[in-house]
Amino acid sequence: MADIVVPSVIFSGTELTGPAIDRLSRRIGDLNDIFHDKAALAAMPAAQTVYEVASYFPVPDGTEAGLFFGITYIHPGKVGNEYFMTKGHFHKLRDRGEMYMTIEGEGMLILMDENRQTHAEKMYPGSLHYINGHIAHRTVNTGNTILTFSAVWPSDAGHDYDTISTEGFSKILIEKDGKPALVENNL
Ligand code: M6P
Ligand code: ZN
């Protein structure tokens, strides 16, 4: 290997580019489980993008003690009175933590422990969020512009989506009187 190597993965501050970037889009039609207002959901175009993730996986998934890096872009919007948000997950290896940093936009990080105790942290440009292991996490765009944040997580953490898709979070973030409100999820 040459002494000096120029990385081919570049993070511009908002965009992640390079040959090894994995990109995924989550659309309304992929997110039937997570939004509470099923009638409002059914009235929206299934192909409408809710969020996109660009990730850099420098080591294979499952590698012990490696790290992954991702940028998530949540579009502004709502399904009924519930803001656009990510699916949310626990880590498969429950004790693995994660770090988020907000790049642009405004939002909320919803955190739920294994006893279903839920609270939220405000996300704003520069806000840093340490997510302990054993905590489910979901991000929500509460603004009128795209919410962009970076994430770093262990390459052996894995995603447990099933627990959230069957049980949900105990609280949801809705717009109430023109403002975000974290309320009990009664569904
Ligand atoms: C962050 C990280 C990723 C995650 C993404 C979208 O970038 O936590 O691991 O995939 O957000 O969240 P979700 O997987 O819950 O849809
Ligand atoms: Zn995670």
Image (spheres, helix red, strand yellow):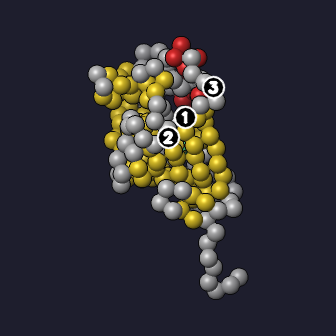
Quadrant holding the N terminus: bottom right
Which mark is drawn over residue 183? none
Q: Quadrant of residue 108?
A: top left
Q: Amino acid at mark 1?
A: Val
Kindly identify the residue that appears in the image at 64 percent across and 48 percent down: 23
| Disc 1: which residue | 50
Query: Mark 1 and mark 2: span between their CA atoms?
Result: 6 Å
SS under mark 3: loop
Q: Amino acid at mark 2?
A: Ile
SS under mark 1: strand
| Disc 2: which residue | 74
* Whole-percent x, y for residue 123 in the image: 36, 44
Kindly identify the residue that appears in the image at 50 percent across and 40 percent down: 74
| Disc 3: which residue | 46
> Considering only vertical position in the picture, is 6 above or below 87?
below
Is 89 on the left-hand or right-hand side of 63?
Answer: left
Seen as rendered, the residue at the extreme bottom is: 3
- Name the one closer to the observer, 129 or 51: 51
- Name the one closer to the observer, 9 or 128: 9
Q: Are marks 1 and 2 in contact (CB under 8 Å)?
A: yes
Q: Are marks 2 and 3 in contact (CB under 8 Å)?
A: no
